[in-house]
Image (spheres, rainbow, N blue to C red):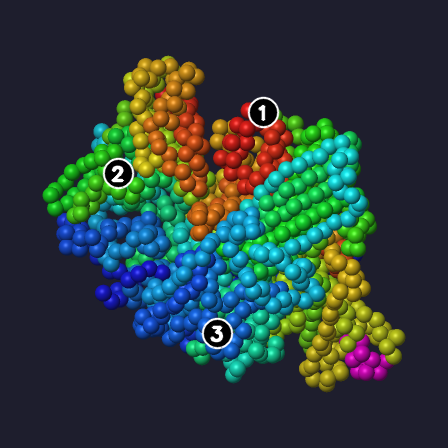
Amino acid sequence: MGKREIELRLNGVERRLEVEDQVLLIELVRGLGLVGTKLSCDTQVCGACTVLLDGRPVSSCTTLAIEADGKPVETIEGLADGTKLHPLQEAFIDRFAFQCGYCTPGMIVSAKALLEARPDPDAPAVRHWMEGNICRCSGYQTIVDAVLDAADRMRSAR
Amino acid sequence: MLRRFDVHRATSVKEAVRLRQMLGEDAAVYAGGTELLLAMKLGVARWPHLIDVKPIASLREITATKDTLRIGATATHWDIERDTVVAKTLPAFARLEASVANVRVRAAGTLAGNLAFAEPHADPPALLLALGGRVVLEGGAGSRSLPIADFITGMYQTAIAADEIIVAIEVPLPASDVRIAYVKFQILERPSVGVAAVATVRDGRFVGAPTVVVGAVDEMARAVPTAQFAGADARAAGTRDAIAEAARGAVEPTADLAGSVEYKRHLVGVFAQRAVDSLLAQAS
Amino acid sequence: MSAEHGGTTEHRVVGTSARRADGIAKVTGSARYAVDLSVPGMAHAVVVRSTRAHARIAGIERDAAAASPGVIRVLTGDDLLAAGLTPYYGHVVLDHPVLAIERVRFHGEPVALVIAETKREAAEAAELVEVAYEELPVVIDAHDALKPDAPNLHERRGERVGDEGMDEGEGGLATNICAIARVGWGGDIEDAFTKAHLVVEGEYRYPMLYGYAMEPYNALAFFDQGDLVVYSSAQHVYMVRRDLARMFHLPLARVRVSAPYVGGGYGTKSYTKVEGMTAAAAFFTGRPVKLDLSVEEAILTTRSAAAHIRARSAFTKDGLLLARDFDIVMNSGAYTDNTPLVNSKTANRCFGPYRIPALRVLARSVFTNTVPSSSLRGFGAPQGNIAGELQMDEAAAKLGIDPVELRLRNLVGPGEEFMPGKRPLDADLKDDLRCLSAALEWPGATAGHSIGLGVSASDAGAYPTSTAAVRIHSDTSITLFTGSTELGQGSRTVLAQIVAEELGVPLESVSVINGDTGVVTYERTTGASRTTTITGRAVQEACRDARRRVRELAVQALSVASGEIEDTAGGVRAKGKELSYGEVIEKWFGAGGEVLGHGAVRRAEGFAKMPPFYEIGCSGLELTVDRETGQVHVTKLTTVGDVGFAINPALVHGQDAGAAMMGMGAALHEELVYDGEQLANPNVVDYRVPRFSDIPDQLIHLLAERRDGSGPYGAKGAGEGAGNTIGSSVASALGRLFGVFPHQLPMTPERVWRLMREAKRE
């Protein structure tokens, strides 16, 4: 079979694309130039490839692109509003929650889904939600701090 | 990167069955794909066709009658964890679902897919077996339901017929005074031991025999012979030790990077006791 | 000793936890790593890997692959030979084939390279390449490789190409010995052992590890009018340049290697990895070619050396060391790579910063038919400490002396030489240790909790060759050129802070261009915790040179004598008038213009004595054990960053936290396991790195800033030290908890369980 036409809302922009069935969502996204989403383990365990599909965090390395048909997809590039950073992004910077940065897009996207599901998590809830995201550089604590910090910022902004 | 394949979207169970009949061994049933696509990526399996059952509306439903919780085949672990019907009827199962793999696998992976793949190191089969869960299948010959123990027949092997799909998992709802526990040990990506325990406890004694099932350590979940514990004092050290011994004897652990046979067998005993402790800690 | 750096009025920018220069790029996903780059017309390469651990290549059948759709070319090692290229690389010994030649020496070794229009087409064609092997006897275990009947993996040794800074090995190496190092002093060591009140003796094992930098190795290569351009994930772009120049017989000036942001290094991306293969693909096809490895392939490219150490330590009744004796055997894999240096450092780092009257160390790294080993964070110190530091704890237990007190009695003091002929110790380890033990509340009072701690001083910094350049623009903003790469350690930020401090300009006005041999200035390596100390000094020199140039321009432009010009923040003062750099520049040029300052450091003056500095490791932890499962839970982790001066305290804490967590990984879970001729767990599903659930309950990261380093403002390096004693800390904590000291890492739950059973039996 050839290509299938899909329509998705990618970082708020309506896109109409043709993809073959076996193309993975990470291949689609990175192929469109959105290279913030990273490939690492390619086996769903590291989280570097996390994107939000219909609001849920998924491993884009093991999700078919055609699953995005009719759904919103959000990558790291969709968080900032122009130059205005998302509170998570600000918190990650202020808390030094990254070093090499390769895991960071996946971390932030995953945390965004957490804070949407649970705006006031405690540290154990953050650690449980993020357990599927690996960081090799930081030792993780600054990431937990950043997510809790972002939750505070987002609550005060409301 | 995956090898080329075509995805066929079934909009009804009948259509899915027909596709299964038409495509035979060249097709796999696909919903979340968390096990399936990974297996294809690793090169351990290859299918030129996938039959996507997610468009079938009836498979998404989670419903309950007075006696039975019915979880549709395309319900994800994420859905089950949060579902209000599950929360009301079988919260212990919601808790188990919340502990499966990681949040991304839970977001996309289905309970039915987990059972269909029959990965030995899995959480759901032990508790489903302990509760008397059944897999509801539909194929060319019609509908049937198999108890978990008859559905999962070995490592990565099930009794599903070539033209069948899973449509639901049904769990008989226990009486309100029945206690349910699931405990596990996990260091790597998959659990290395999981123990489900289901029992009625009154004044510290088992009413009838407790049900204990050990999963994730053998080729499939194994029920532990527990008839001798009917009416036993659940708090007595002797009972706990005997249950642990029975559990240890009921499994043949697979040695792997998570541990030797000897260590895993030891863990089975430990977690059988912890499952009983968890039952006792619950208010009736 | 401080947990929070208070900041002083002495400095304006250094000493503050300035936000990272790469922050916005990394949190928005706009930071580009080599793997993200592409150029028009780019082709893709996929590696065909050996399915044998040791075999002669009888033939490679590639016609089917070559005819496969999209395939441009299929390359083998013989093609490189036939084209007159140097088909080997290696920065110490030239023995690592770009693609296997005549023989494969480990399962997974690259045998052929398929280049196609798309990665999918290359992968599909790669499956069609058929290699015929004539199997040879295989040796996986290092001790087996030392046996007289072992197969000889390198009958013909490669040419030694290392320079003074690298070639620390001995010549005349016997069968399968890749590197050998001997360290020793003092008199009759056996006499010391016979006279000792206590001899602690044991065998210790440190596992084979995978660094798991989350960005796997990758490169993009093309030829630009005969000049070679390579973008890759390399830590040492100038070392790769050298290998590539040799490979293609090109002058250094016509090879350009550039590393944008690197997605994790930890030493695993030191030296050449896939750049040679990728450049060869570009050479033969005339196309830009990209090669990016999967994580599994990355594991098949580089791992770290496992160690088996037989150690003896002799003590007096009062716990004073009389002698130490180490026999170290490391399994270092199929090719030399960085083994001579790792081997040498393991020999230097096993006995600890103690007064040792008599020492004997023999370290041998052995060729085996396994993945080649190379640098990994700690670089021999973690391996050495599982024997050396642990024996201090074992001795303390046997002598009935507090292990902290035992160390205090033996530690050398600041300014004391503990390795003859080498730089005296530039740290106050006793104070560090007291600080550490106080923070851990040693000896601890909670039942079931056990504390382990340790001290190490690594001869760090590698070779102190570094240059830097600063451009002062006509608006007083600054560009820093540095050959150091940004691996996440924060080099771009720290070096910018030094520039801002030295030149008296706001940090925001400093931009950094780094890691591109075609653009910036020479940096020997980025690793060995050296960038702050050594590159930092070069940056200071560049700033001083720039200021000198500005003063020269001011003399001419303002017609004043040089004695009448003073440096100010961001400019000069002459005849009572203050001018910014930019104003001086514009005045001199008439319009526009800029000033360039250049700095260079070498093994001279402050860096004359080797090592350029010691990297201190002073970490400890408190743990509990689930007595039924053996699972360890770390309740407290404490690190002391004895860095002389923290140019950016938050970044030091980050390095310490990361290094300690990596140390915990090796101490508790990480181990690459060979199952016969192949790795059983070449992936991160079955190789377990630390996760969120491993965060210790309480983390304390302290700084010791005594301004005692050879780097800027008295700084010394960080990045590895905090992890060096984590392994021995876990082992000693378990030993004190159960009364039996484990001698092997990782202490997985099963191994702890077995230790508990062994303890019950004793």
Whether residue B16 is visible to the viewer of this picture, yes or no, is: yes
Q: Which chain carries label 2?
A: B
Residue C353, above or below C335? above
Q: Mark 3 lies on which chain?
A: C
Is B82 one of the magenta-colored residues?
A: no
Image side of residue C241 versus residue C1, left or right: left
Residue nearer the viewer, B268 or C9 = B268
Residue of label 3: C80
Q: What element carries label 3?
A: helix
Examine the image and state in which quarter residue C289 appears.
bottom left
Q: What residue type is labelled 1?
A: Glu
Residue C499 horizontal/vertical position (percent):
71, 65
The magenta span reads C550-560
Residue nearer the viewer, C655 or C295 = C295
Per the model, the C-alpha gap separating discs 1 and 3 is: 61 Å
Judged by depth in the image, the label closer to the viewer, 3 or 2, is 3
Q: Which residue is drawn at 43% across and 31% down?
A: B262
Q: What residue type is labelled 2?
A: Ile
Q: Residue C137 carries which label?
A: none
Q: Residue at x 51, y 55 (%)?
A: C151
Q: Residue C762 carries which label?
A: 1
Residue of label 2: B152
Whether residue B134 is visible to the viewer of this picture, yes or no, is: no
Per the model, the C-alpha gap separating discs 3 and 2 is: 54 Å
